[in-house]
Amino acid sequence: MALKEIITIPDPVLRENCSPIEDITPELKTLMQDMLETMYDAPGVGLAAPQINIPIRLIVMDAAQKEDSDEKEPIIMINPKILSSSDDRSVYEEGCLSIPEYFAEIERPAIVKVGYLDEEGKEQERDCEGLLGTVVQHEIDHLDGVLFIDYISKLRRDRVIKKFAKAKKVITI
Ligand code: NI
């Protein structure tokens, strides 16, 4: 297993529409484990493949992590798709490993039903609610090049993007 580098805005890969996965190869299985390791190390509750510079439809999550416990409940979803969303909405303060140290309250459907392939390529469906409901929507957004800052006002978004563009320049000089 290996830790992968997480890319940050304004990297254009984060805005790509990611490709569906056709085959579950040994390389893909290694990638899933690398993504989980990278997510736990960050630490984060979710990670999408484009965030490690690979624009394919693969996400990993663990919304059950607690500070005082090593128990893990990793979830891997290949080609995930939201099949239905509740009318009920919930609000969480979201962040993103690709937009470090920026947080904003985002409102989303409280419960979503997600269809996906598991790591063995078997079709699955899962109702996701609570924190997992928000995380899975945030990660699936990544596969369509959508970031949580797209839900805040343009003024605030432009400010965040500008800040990161400037920071990047300083590093590359
Ligand atoms: Ni994110």
Image (cartoon, helix red, strand yellow):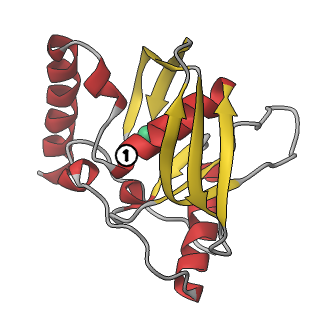
Would you say residue 126 is visible in this rendering? yes
Residue topped by disc 1: 142
Query: Residue 167, percent across and down?
Result: 21, 36
Mark 1: amino acid: His
- Indicate yes or no: mark 1 CB to ligand 1 under 8 Å: yes
> Relative to the observer, which residue lies in front, 14 or 90?
90
Residue sitting at 57 percent across and 51 percent down?
115
Q: Residues within 10 Å of mark 1 (few under 14, many from 20)?
A: many
Q: Quadrant of the N terminus?
A: bottom right
Would you say residue 44 is visible in this rendering? no
Would you identify the image quadrant in which residue 147 lies? Answer: top left
Looking at the image, residue 150 lies above or below residue 53: above
Query: Residue 27, percent across and down?
Result: 53, 84
Looking at the image, residue 13 lies above or below residue 97: below
Query: Residue 128, percent across and down?
Result: 66, 35
Give the SS element for disc 1: helix
Residue sitting at 62 percent across and 74 percent down?
121
